[in-house]
Image (cartoon, helix red, strand yellow):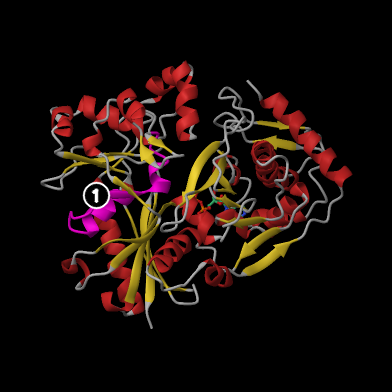
Amino acid sequence: MKYLLALDQGTTSSRAIVFDREGKVAGVGQRPFEQLFPHPGWVEHRPEDIWNSQLGAVRDALATVGIGPEDIAAIGITNQRETTVVWNRRTGRPIHNAIVWQCRRTADRCDGIRSSLLGAEIQQKTGLVVDAYFSASKIEWLLEQVAGAREAAEAGDLAFGTVDAWLLWNLTGGKVHATDVSNASRTMLCDIRRSAWDDDLLSTFSVPRAMMPEIVPSSGVIGETDPDLFGGAIPIAGIAGDQQAALFGQMCSQPGMAKNTYGTGCFLLVHTGEKACESRNSLLTTVAWKLGDAPVEFALEGSVFIAGAAIQWLRDGLQLIGDAAETEALAKSVPDTGGVSFVPAFVGLGAPYWDPHARGIITGLTRGTTRSHLVRAALEAIAFQTRDIVEAMIGDANDAFSGVFALRELRVDGGAAANDFLMAFQADVLGVPVVRPTVTETTAAGAAYLAGLGVGYWSDLAELRNLWKRDRVFEPTSDETWRAKGYEQWKTAVARAKG
Ligand code: ADP
């Protein structure tokens, strides 16, 4: 009996999950690591912490299940995206801490580019709205700020990688310097229609080509682990960024299939097939994955900044609840919000409004408003924000597919997807079924699926589709009039939240 091992390298912890042939979780290892905030708005990780915590998590997971490297058919890697590491090829030592995706240190630089003609060109080529999230301006900063870095990079002595590449390098004992095409698509240096580093983009950010990793498919053998690490070599056969891995783990493998992850924020991705759709709503066009020699597949991505975080605020900011799970019963205890709308625009509004000056607002308060109404309004806000993204996505995809794009269901995961009220309300607001799978570790599952496919452990997508199982389907019970009325009330509240 062989297993698959997923390395799920996240922003606050590294996890390792062992999956069996049925796609069920056999064991988990998890190690947190330190977050560094050297200045307001700056976020760093020590690359050594990322690697050591990941290594520890793997060893823990193997010990928990009681297996060794000979029992693992392949490793799949999924990772926090865009976070940037630069290291010396000879010593393997990083030249600086990793600059984390959340870090805003290059925001001014990116704001300048976004509003210029160049901004539109970059968006066309990369599918990304120019922003400090993506790796390009972070590499530029490192080469400018670290003494001697630019010369060393030009001489070919330095290597750049997102976290997948950094792990791959260390796992293979420095033998492989590569990144998968989904991670490459988040650097803002990749022409997503050619899956290649682009000379114009490299020169815009003054990044020498010599430091760039090879771009490889998301599924297929990329290398094998240094035998000294785990007492035997294991093939590494799958890589994808976390959201793309979740899309794959949800088996949203055909155009029009979509998943939403309900965490601190929401990440909604819809598969658009072999076509890279351009967005009119400033959603992101992103590579979903590339399976071996098959063509690259694409997705549209939209995110809600504040989703579960609104529930955290009810708990920690207002102390209205003791625990996030209480919200379900409270919301169900009232038939509606009694006219209350809550727009949690704590950090501005994202797609499709794009108003950084918007701030949170609660409208429609009366003497009759209770805690339950407020809690219900917060949960409803998560569902309405998701509908905003879905509407924008369908519009963008329709443009590209001559109006044939329809959302038939929404697959869900993430912490807040456990809330049955929220899921039922989401189905009502969208008018499509919301489907929650049995395995909610979809990110890790996606990495395992990619790796399993890469070594022939699972033969094809059809076999993987059989592994993905529905736990619960929330069918919409609303009619069009109800949907329109509720959405109008939401939009009115959003208009009041705008800056
Ligand atoms: P992340 O990966 O972004 O840290 P998780 O997927 O762990 O997030 O989900 C945690 C978030 O979900 C928190 O913001 C929390 O407030 C919210 N949450 C967790 N359980 C529930 C629940 N039962 N109902 C509503 N929100 C919940």
On the image, the x and y values in percent for residue 297 come to 51, 50
Decide which of 313, 350 is in the foreground and name it: 350
Q: Nearer the viewer, residue 221 or 267?
A: 221
Would you say 90 lies left or right of 496 here? Answer: left
The residue identified by callout 1 is: 177
Can residue 383 be found in the magenta stretch?
Answer: no
- Please report the bounds of the magenta region as a residue range: 164-188
Q: Quadrant of the C terminus?
A: top right
Q: Amino acid at mark 1?
A: His
Q: Nearer the viewer, residue 102 or 228?
A: 228
Q: Residue at x 41, y 74 (%)?
A: 457
Height in image: 466 above or below 319? Answer: below
Picture residue at 44% right of the left edge, 53% below the top: 290
| Farthest left residue in view | 90
Q: Is residue 466 left or right of residue 484?
A: left
Q: Is residue 179 magenta?
A: yes
Quarter of the figure with the N terminus: bottom left
At which x and y percent is residue 106?
36, 26
Q: Position of residue 128 (x, y in %)?
A: 48, 33
Q: Quadrant of residue 63?
A: bottom left
Q: How many marks?
A: 1
Residue occupying image coordinates x 84% and y 52%: 478
Residue sitting at the far bottom:
1
**Would residue 470 be found to the left or right of residue 476 on screen?**
left
- Residue at disc 1, secondary structure: loop
Whether residue 315 is visible to the viewer of this picture, yes or no, is: no
Left-right relation of 448 to 353: left
Res. 402 in view: yes
